[in-house]
Each structure stands twice: as structure tokens, then as C-alpha cells.
Amino acid sequence: MDNNKKDYGYLNAMKQYLIIALFLIMAAGCKRDPKPAEALDKDVFIEVLTDIHIAEGIYSERNRLPFDSLKSDLLYESVLKKHNVTEDEMVATTVYYSRHPREYDKIFSEVLSNISALLEEENLSKAIDVKK
């Protein structure tokens, strides 16, 4: 009988240690991931990504070729320069949001909305030009 009581005591102690260990693991996993100081503001990042995707589309449409790395580097550099953004800022922001996929998804939804609005505006202006 005494052996059974000791076993239960041991099991209870193991359960307590297991609960504490799980709590510590969860607490470590939920640690805040602060945005780096050099990361871009969310709205600026959305503007830059919108321009990058537009520039990629224009390049692909005009050249009917996939990006070549030298030309794509120049394309990205020109977009970053337009927004006064450094490559380090863009990388830090991209890395940060890649660790936060839900936020990144929201950002890309806004980028797509921006592009859709610009396309709609372009189609509207073409329709007005045709009527003239």
C-alpha cells in the first residue's frame, strides 16, 4: 500500500513539473518580437511594395521576358530611391513581417487593393478618352 502512495506522489510531482515546463515553453514562444528600429512604417512599406509590383508588371509586359537579375536590381533600386528607402530598411521590414505572416497577409491585401484601384482608375481614364 505504501508503495502505491509513493507512486502517486511521484506522479503528482511529475505532473507539476510537466505543467511548469509547458508553461515556460509557451511563455518563451509567446515572447514579443519588437519591430526593428530600421524597419519601415507599415504604410510606407505598403506604398513601396505596391510600386515594386507595378514596376515588375510593367517590366514583364514590355519585355515579355522574366526578370534578369541585373535589370531587376535596377528596378528595385529605383523604387527604393523614389521612396527614400534604403535596402537595409527594406530587408529589415521584410524579415520582420515574414515572421508575422498574418500581418504580412494584411499588407499584401492592401497592396492588391492599391493595384486594383490603380487599374480601375486607368481603365476609367481610357474609357473617358475613348468617348472624347
Image (cartoon, helix red, strand yellow):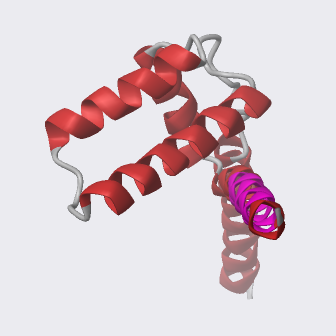
Q: Is residue 92 left or right of residue 59?
A: right
Question: Can you name the residue that lies furthest to the front here?
Answer: 132
Image quarter hosting the C terminus: bottom right
Which sits in the foreground, 103 or 131?
131
Tell me, yes or no, if residue 13 can be seen here: no
- The residue that appears at 66% across and 81% down in the rendered structure is 3
Residue 16 spot, x, y in % from top left: 76, 60
Residue 2 spot, x, y in % from top left: 73, 80
Residue 125 spot, x, y in % from top left: 78, 57
Q: Is residue 51 left or right of residue 40?
A: left
Q: Is residue 100 above or below residue 88?
A: below
Q: Is residue 81 above or below residue 33?
A: above
Residue 119: quarter of image:
bottom right
Residue 46 spot, x, y in % from top left: 69, 39
Q: Is residue 74 above or below residue 129?
A: above
Residue 62: quarter of image:
bottom left
> Does the magenta segment cover residue 125?
yes
The part of the chain drawn in magenta is 111-127
Which sits in the foreground, 54 or 10?
54
> Does the magenta segment cover residue 78?
no
Tell me, yes or no, if residue 118 can be seen here: yes
Please count the marks in the image: 0
Image quarter hosting the N terminus: bottom right
Q: Is residue 9 left or right of residue 128?
A: left
